[in-house]
Image (cartoon, rainbow, N blue to C red):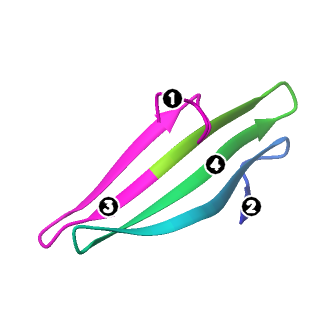
Amino acid sequence: MKWQRGPSSSFELKLLRKEDINGQPRKVYAYALVSCADRKDGVLIVHASKAHYYTIDISGANEADPRV
């Protein structure tokens, strides 16, 4: 998926995988903020519990980064 953010930048989002953690769904996405000057990668984790949705944004890293 790709969105334009103004005339010279965009936001790209890609679903990497769906997981089931102890009966609760989780999705892991890779994203990139792309402009003429640079590209900033990140990972977004969306975890659903019985009562809440949690999002964890790890900006400046890709999935292979040990911080993820």
The secondary element bearing badge 2 is classed as: strand
Neighbourhood count class around disc 2 (C-alpha, 10 Å): few under 14, some 14–19, many 20 upward: few
Residue 25, image x, y percentages = 33, 71
Foreground disc of the pair 4, 1: 1
Quick check: is 32 in the magenta stretch?
no
Residue corresponding to mark 1: 66
If you read the primary sequence from the N terminus, does the residue marked by circle 2 or circle 3 appear first? 2
Neighbourhood count class around disc 4 (C-alpha, 10 Å): few under 14, some 14–19, many 20 upward: many
Foreground disc of the pair 1, 3: 1
Between the residue at mark 2 and the residue at mark 3, the CA separation in whole angstroms equals: 22 Å
If you read the primary sequence from the N terminus, does the residue marked by circle 2 or circle 4 appear first? 2
Q: Residue furthest top?
A: 37
Residue corresponding to mark 4: 31
Residue 37 shown left or right of residue 54 in the figure? right
Neighbourhood count class around disc 1 (C-alpha, 10 Å): few under 14, some 14–19, many 20 upward: few
Between the residue at mark 1 and the residue at mark 2, the CA separation in whole angstroms equals: 26 Å
Q: Quadrant of the N terminus?
A: bottom right
Front-lying residue, 36 or 51:
51
